[in-house]
Structure formats: structure tokens, C-alpha cells
Image (cartoon, grey):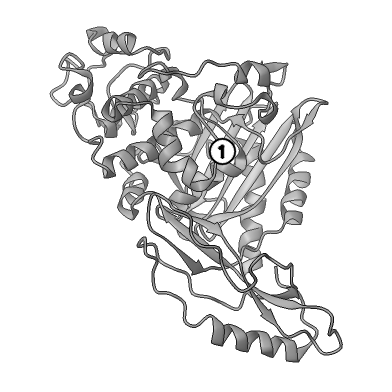
Amino acid sequence: MLHPISRLGALMTALALILTSCGPAPQGSASGAPSQSLDAVTVLQPDPRPPQPGTVPDSPDGPSQEETAPAEAPVLTQEDIDDALAQVMANYRATAVSVATIEHGALSQSGAWGWAVKNEREMSPDTKVRIASISKVVIAMCAMAMAEEGIVSLDAPISDYWGSGAVNPYSKGQPTVRTFMTHTSSIKNLDTTRGLSTLRGILQSRSSWRAMEPGNGGYWSYSNFGMCILGTTLELAYDGLLDDYLQQHFLEPIGAKASFFGGRMEQSELATLYTTGGVGRSAAEHAGQSIPTQIGQGASYFPGGFTVSAVDMVKLVSVLANDGVYQERQDRYIEVSPPIGEPNVQYSIVVPTYQETRLLSEESVADMETPRFTVSPGDTAPFDQCLILRRQEDVLGRDVIYYHTGSAYGVFSLMTYDPETRDGIVVITTGASRNMNEHGMYSLCYDLMDILYAKMEADRV
């Protein structure tokens, strides 16, 4: 936020200090992510007295190289979030809404409205919610990271991991991790289930397969059961639980608490999932879920069981929006001389900076974002199918938006990001009606995003 500066002398001191103390902006981070050049977004304000004024904390150990780079400051304020929530909720009914935003590739603001548990606990942007099918995006990110590490091949037949019997007898080509990520694996969309032997038996049965060539977009069929197979294929390749890999590679480095298994959460952290007619799943029921210990036991959680807050989900989305790099704001405070007439007040300039951690390669993100074919649902606008992600043009006031939706047990959720501006938003609702707009996105979520994206754009002009 820019604060008005009443003393010209103080402003000149501030600008001079930036030029002499900060020097030119770095050209790139140690992780390979491009750094942002420092603009005029500096703040002259009473010094908040951080423990070490004029310094940035040392980077913690992480899975990749990290470096602090100058950053552009976000334009959204908490008031913007609160006003947008109030404006949207004047037109919709819901039990709870939580929202978090990305600006310039990093978490910027968050907010919430309503009840996590009716009349007991208010909703917050940190409340954990079973986010439904947005879970599939998390699986895709794990698949790309595993491929980078050589754990799994995106293009090898899944029989390499399941055994020679796991084949489609009606096709020449065979399903791969990549075809599961485009819903063209050729497996039928059976009921979700779990258990390694059960899943292997299904893959070995001729009746489980469709007579089509895997990867053919003309036979696209959205498949929750396919995610049971995809997630378990990753577990077989990793020789361990997908949730454990997720924790180590993504969640711990970004400081997020989330899981495919609700049993890893405390009841007090969770929202009850409300439908328009009652309770879809209580917080107590969700916290009481068993935690799998063997490969395949958690398969039925993969299509939609990821439990996360709006804030922590937007952190994950920011990795995609920022070409594989997670950025955490670590402001630099530089002391300056106080304005004349205020000798007892210490002032500082706040130089916004980001600590960077690369979690995916730029190439992997580009692969996820590459359109494979166009899907025409009929009742809503067509979209480009990418690797789990969907892509539309000219929506939410942006040239291109990548997104995914989620719905289950009364939750309607939407994640979107703009790869050009590196902005993004996650909205999670409970107890709302299933109103879907012409873009195939839930109307409450979309309208809230529309206001916030417009505010980001307007304030930058």
C-alpha cells in the first residue's frame, strides 16, 4: 500500500537510500526463476521495528535453490476482499465462503464469510475444506514433479507399474499417466474404490475398458475413477503413499497444512460441509477418517478428497502461476531519517521482496498448460483440455485463464490463474446452490473472482 508522504525531504532521502542501498535488481534467481525489477513501490511509514531492520532473514533449507528478489507490491487490500464478499453475498445464499488471491505470482490477500460450523465457529481463509475435484490439479503437480525426478514416466504404459495384465485389450496403444491426465485413458468411469488388489483386478478385466485408442480427444470422458488409478500408479512408481510425497515435495516447503486424508486434520481446523438441505459431511466425521498406510488404500480419496484452506490452496496455485516457483514475501526494512519536526519517530522504507523456491520446472508447467484438444460440453462454453487443467480465453476480463472446478458434499469450488499477469484466485463455498454459468464455472465463485480480477487490473492502471 502506498502511504502519502508529507515531507519532500523525507521522500528524497528515501529514494536516495534505495538507489544507494539496494543497487540494481538481480537478473535472475539461483533457481532459474526470473526476478522482478524494483519499481517505485516503496512505503515511508513509522518503523514497525522488525527484529533486524535493514535485513532479510536468511533463506531456510529447502528442496531447491532459493534467493531473495525485489518484488512488485500487491494492489488488493483487505478492504477490497471484504467489500467484494459483501457485494457478492448480497446476491447469493451460502453457509460459508473463503477466498485467497495471487498477485505477481505470490499470495496477496484472503478473506471469508459465514460459518465453518453453524453458530459455533466462523469461517476463515485458513479453515480446511474438502475441496472436491480441484484435488485433481494437486495429483497432476505431483505427477510432473515425479517425472522430473525420474520416478515415473508420463508416457510409459501403466502396465509398467501394474503388471502385464493391466492393458486395454481393444486398443493397440496403451493408457499412460498422460492419458489419465486428459481423461482419455480408455478406462470406463466406474465407481471410485480403493485397495491395490481390487484396482489391479479391475484393470485386468476386459469389461473395464472402452474400445478406443488412449489419448483420442474425441472419446474424452471425465473420470473420477481414472484418478483412483492415476494416483495409485504414482504410488506404485514412488513405492510409497502419494500423500507422503505431496507433503515432502510441495506442502512442507510452502508452509501449508493439507492432505488427501481428512484424518490428518484436527476437527477444530475443519469446516462442516453443508448442502442447501442439511449437512453433507460434518467436521467430526471428516476428522475421523482413517489414514491409509499402504499403497492403494487411499485411492478413493484422490478424485476429490484433498482437504485444504483457501490460503494454502492458493499457495499451490501460485506455483503454477509463477512458472514453477513459489514466492513468499519477505519485506526488507531500510531505516531513514525522520521528517523534520518529528525527531522521536523512527521511519523506514519497506522494500517488498520475495524469497523464491523452485518446486516445478518451467517446462513442466508449460507441459501442464499445453492444450491437447477442445471439449464441447454442449450446455456450457467449450474449453481446452490440458493436463488436468482447463483453459478458456476471454473470461474474467483476462485473455487466457487456466482453471478447475470442484463439487461434492455441498462444496462448490473454483481455482483460476492468469499466466501472463501471474494473478490467481481460489474460492471455496459450502451450502450454496449449484448455479453454473455459461463458462461452466460456479456463479458465486465466478462473480467474486470477476470483482477481484477487475480490481487488480484497475488499481494497476
From where the camera sits, is residue 303 visible?
Answer: yes
Q: Where, quadrant-wise, is the C terminus in this rendering?
A: bottom right
- Outermost residue to the left: 172
* In-front residue for pair 352/371: 352
**Residue drawn at (61%, 40%), measured in percent from left and top?**
310
Expressed as whole percent of the image width and height from the top left, the position of residue 53 reads 65, 71
Q: Is residue 137 visible from the viewing direction of this image?
A: no
- Callout 1: few (<14), some (14-19), or many (20+) C-alpha neighbours within 10 Å? many
Q: Amino acid at mark 1?
A: Leu
Residue 7: image location, x then y, percent: 79, 87
* Residue 367 % position (x, y): 31, 47
Q: Is residue 343 left or right of residue 415?
A: right
Q: Secondary structure at mark 1?
A: strand
Residue 293 location, x and y as percent? Answer: 42, 18
Check disc 1 and report the residue beneath it: 414
Between 194 and 103, the residue placed more toward the observer is 194
Residue beneath the point at 67% across and 30% down = 269
Q: Residue at x 42, y 22 (%)?
A: 224
Left or right: 334 with respect to 307? right
Residue positioned most to the front: 51
Q: Nearer the viewer, residue 370 or 134?
A: 134
